[in-house]
Structures are given as structure tokens and as C-alpha cells.
Amino acid sequence: MLAVTLTVLTCGQAAGQMPRGEQFPEGSYSPVTNINRNGYPRVLADNSVMFRVNAPQAQSVRVDLGGSRYEMTKGEGGVWTVTTRPQVPGFHYYALFIDNVSVADPASRSFYGSSRWSSAIEIPEKGMEVFEVQDVPHGEVRTVYYFSKVEDAWRPLMVYTPAGYNEGKQEYPVVYIQHGGGEDHRGWMEQGRTAQIMDNLIAAGKAVPMIVVSSNSNVQSRGGGMGGGYSWQGMQTFRTEMIDNIIPFVEKTYRVRKDRRSRAMCGLSMGGGQSFYIGLRDPEVFANVGVFSTGMFGGISGASNFDLETEVPGILTDTKNFNRQFDVFFMSCGEQDPRIEYTRSIVKKMRDGGVEVRFNSYPGDHEWQVWRKSLHEFAQYLFR
């Protein structure tokens, strides 16, 4: 009962306004992920973050930010505070621990990631205004439902349509974009800022207008099996869902071009593995593939001895034909991601064998700022 009481106190007060007569630290600002712009947490000038929590009955309070733990200090009136180390720009999940009970901070928006709802804080990166809402024509993001014959149930999609879609009659190419493990269809549209990226690229003439479809790849078949694992066999449940259910629904519901050259598949981490297998082994469906930060080549537990030719027959033995089948094949990874050297190695092997693959890396670990940049670059190559 004590933990519940403390949680209620925190929820009721941590999201409140700044107490009268007190001032925020000079040079600090409220991140866009705050619920109350006149409250905490605050980002300081050096990108460190100051947290403030009212929990007078608590014996201990700490913040777990991006895997680093910070013990908070109790002050007058039961107000706990701590200032973290400077944080790299980007999107950071965090949680409060009140007497060792993990709770979301009601002062911040919550997002579904790491298989749970978590608080998060956004620290902008200079020069990356393309991730922000700008004064440009804006598209729309809709949540729609399609019937899955794999699950025998209705399932959600989030669909971005570019500015002008509602008023026009033209048909658009489509990107099918996949989330990572522990996430779902909301990841790319919320944490990934897909709409902001696409609005700004299209307005600047750097990307052609396109529709982006984000699905939930955590599919469980009627027989009880759930697709998963970095193997062709492990991809079959979601492959069936994508090809037999999602694409037909999108092509029936939206004004889209229905040829293979007008379809792209991309994704991050687990979604990168899905895009690699499904995209590259179904060239009659997709002519454009983006693979972001996948662990299938190595850098994660269980990944070893990846054989390119076995996993994608013909990629090294019939390379000219492989290259002819794809307009864009793009890969990326964060420079501090444990997967980076394995990814670079496989890209080198592909290029040495004549495979036409684009590759880029960006500062960052296995996190959203890298994946936003990956989409930002990939989108500019598509459907030209």
C-alpha cells in the first residue's frame, strides 16, 4: 500500500506547475515531451536534465534515464531533485523509481517502447530542424483498422498521407515501415516523427510525395505461432500478414500505385531484419528496401555466422540480376551501436561482390535519432 500511496502523490504533484516565487534554472527550457510547459523536467544549457519530484513520504527516489541511474536528493517539503550528466541529442526513455517501485513520470508524455509504456524526454539536435514541425503544408496521420486473416482479428495501422491527398486524385507510392522489438505501429509515427520528416522533405522538394504505412508486426497466427527470429522461416508469419493482408488493404483503401517500383519496405532493428528478408526475397513485391540497425549480422546475442548467399539466394552468385531488381537498397547503423562493425563488414562483403548497396552511419547508439536520420536519407532516394 505504501508504494501505491507514493505513486499517487508523485502523479498528483510532479506534473504540477512551478511553485510560486521559484524560478527555473537560468538558460533551461521545457522539452516538448513535457505535459506542463511550466513544470519539470528541465533541460539545461549543457543538455543535462534537472528532475524535480514531490514525494514527501518516500524513502528513496531515483531516475533511470537511458540505462543510467541517478539518485535524487530529498529537500525541504519532501521535494526530490537531481541533475543528470549532459545527454546526447535525441529521444530518451526514462522511469522514476520510488522506494524501488518503477513508475512513469506523469510530468512527461508516455510512449510505448521496450515492451512497456515509458516516460521520455526529447533533446533537440542543432541543424536537424527537419524533425520538428515547420511552417509547411502538413499531411495527416490516421489510425485505421484492417482484418487480419493470420490472426483472425482486426488490427491497427497508422498511415501518413501527404499534404494535398484529401483534395487530389493522384496516386502515390507507398513505404511500408517497420518498428523494432518491444514497439508497435505507433513507434515510427510518434517517437520516429515520420510525419514531420516527410512534410519537411516534401515541402523542400527533397522527396516525392508518398504514403507511409506503419503496421504492428507482433503478429500471432490462429494456430498460436508467432513469427520472429532472424531467419527466413521466422519471417513467414509476418510476411504473410504483409503481402496477403496489409498491402491489399492499403491498395484497396488508398489512392496508391500498385506496381513493385512504387513500393518500399524499411525498418529499424527487428523491422530492419524483416525488411531485409521480406524485401530482398520478394522483389516482385518491393523494388526498394531500407535496413536500419539490424542485429542479424552480429552485435547481439545469438547472431553469428550469417551467410549472405544462403539467406538471399543469388545476391552473390547472380549479382547483376539482383541489382536489376532493386531501385534502392539502403543500409544504416549508429556509430556507437554494437552492431556497427558487423554491419560495415557485411556491406563491404556485398560491395566486394558487386552488390549495389548504399550505406551510411550516424552518431548514436541503438536509438531514435539514428533511425530518424535513416528515414530522412532513405526517403530522398525513393521513387525517382
Image (cartoon, rainbow, N blue to C red):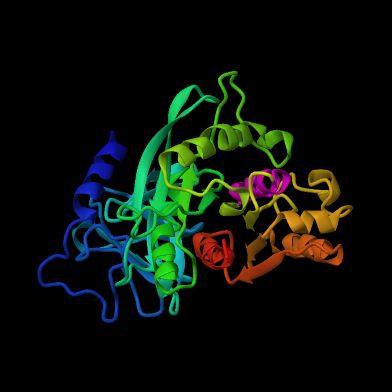
Residue 141 highlighted magenta (yes or no): no
- What kind of secondary structure does the magenta stretch mostly adopt? helix
- Region in magenta: 269-283
Q: Nearer the viewer, residue 338 or 18?
A: 338
Q: Nearer the viewer, residue 120 or 11?
A: 120
Extreme residue in the right direction: 317
The N terminus is located in which quarter?
A: top left
Q: Residue at x 69, y 67 (%)?
A: 358
Quadrant housing residue 79:
bottom left
Residue 281 highlighted magenta (yes or no): yes
Q: Nearer the viewer, residue 97 or 260?
A: 260
Extreme residue in the left direction: 20
The C terminus is located in which quarter?
A: bottom right
Q: Position of residue 33 (x, y in %)?
A: 32, 60
Q: Residue at x 39, y 65 (%)?
A: 199
Q: Position of residue 310 (x, y in %)?
A: 84, 44
Q: Nearer the viewer, residue 81 or 107?
A: 107
Q: Is residue 183 above or below residue 383?
A: above
Q: Residue at x 42, y 74 (%)?
A: 204
Q: Is residue 84 visible?
A: no
Specify whether 277 is left or right of 140: right
Q: Is residue 353 visible?
A: yes
Specify whether 271 is left or right of 102: right
Q: Position of residue 369 (x, y in %)?
A: 50, 65
Q: Residue at x 52, y 43 (%)?
A: 182
Extreme residue in the front direction: 169
Number of labelled discs? 0
Q: Position of residue 192 (x, y in %)?
A: 45, 57
Specify whether 20 is left or right of 378: left
